[in-house]
Image: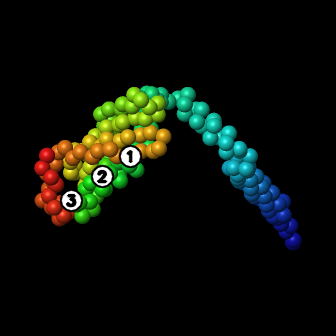
Amino acid sequence: MNKKIYVRTSESSTNMEAKTMKRVLIITLEMLILIGLVITPVYAINTDDVIDNNLQKFLENTEIKQESELETYKNLFTTLLYPYVDKAIQYYYSEYMNYPPREDLFSYNFLSIVKTPEHNYSYTIILEVQPFVGPHLSVGLDHITFKIDLGGVTVEKYEHLKNYELPPNYEGIFKKKLPDT
């Protein structure tokens, strides 16, 4: 007696292969779509538009503190006078110190700005500065008088008004004692 055994392996394996292929195909398509979404904007965006749009959004959503006209002029004068202030401080303190102190732009105090009456484009500016060493340890209080005209900027007078005592570990920076005020 012969028994017949039916095996459905070919149909089952074909279904499994088909399902696996569909999954692979779907995953591949999803990855290509994701890659396309990530890569496409990099090539399709005009960076100027992005910057303009981002800036516009920033301006629309943020309160921006605008400088007053006075602050703008102060910052302009500070910027223009900085090299002359720096050179004047270096010149004055080089006699007393091994290395010159620095000055903080934010501490510039404009005491006066006077237009010379007989000249249209001539001004005298008196500026107060506090040169410092190390972590903003003030060395002194100084006034610098500038003459500004079409010929340029000149230092008319440098006045050292006040000395500040420094911690003992800074004694070695002095060549000689600053003059008494």
Vertical order, 38 against 126 (above or below): below
Q: Crowding near pointer 3: few (<14 within 10 Å), some, many (20+)? A: some
Question: Along the line of sight, which residue is nearer the eye, 37 or 102?
Answer: 102
Residue labelled with disc 2: 89
Picture mark count: 3
Q: Quadrant of residue 166?
A: bottom left
- The residue tagged with tag 2: helix, strand or loop? helix
63 relative position to 31: left or right = left
Question: Along the line of sight, which residue is nearer the eye, 116 or 114?
Answer: 116
- In the rendered image, residue 107, in percent from the top left (x then y), is placed at 31, 41
Task: Return the residue found at the far front.
Answer: 118
Question: Along the line of sight, which residue is nearer the eye, 108 or 146?
Answer: 146
Residue for point 36% across, 31% down: 114
- Name the amino acid type tagged 2: Ile
Quick check: marks 2 and 1 in contact, CB under 8 Å? no
Residue for point 44% across, 39% down: 149
Structural distance between the alpha carbons of marks 2 and 1:
14 Å
Residue for point 26% across, 42% down: 143
Residue 154's label in the rendered image is: 1
Vertical order, 143 against 39 (above or below): above
- In the rendered image, residue 106, in percent from the top left (x then y), is placed at 34, 41
Residue 96's label in the rendered image is: 3
- The residue tagged with tag 3: helix, strand or loop? loop
- In the rendered image, residue 101, in percent from the top left (x then y), is placed at 27, 55
- Name the amino acid type tagged 3: Tyr
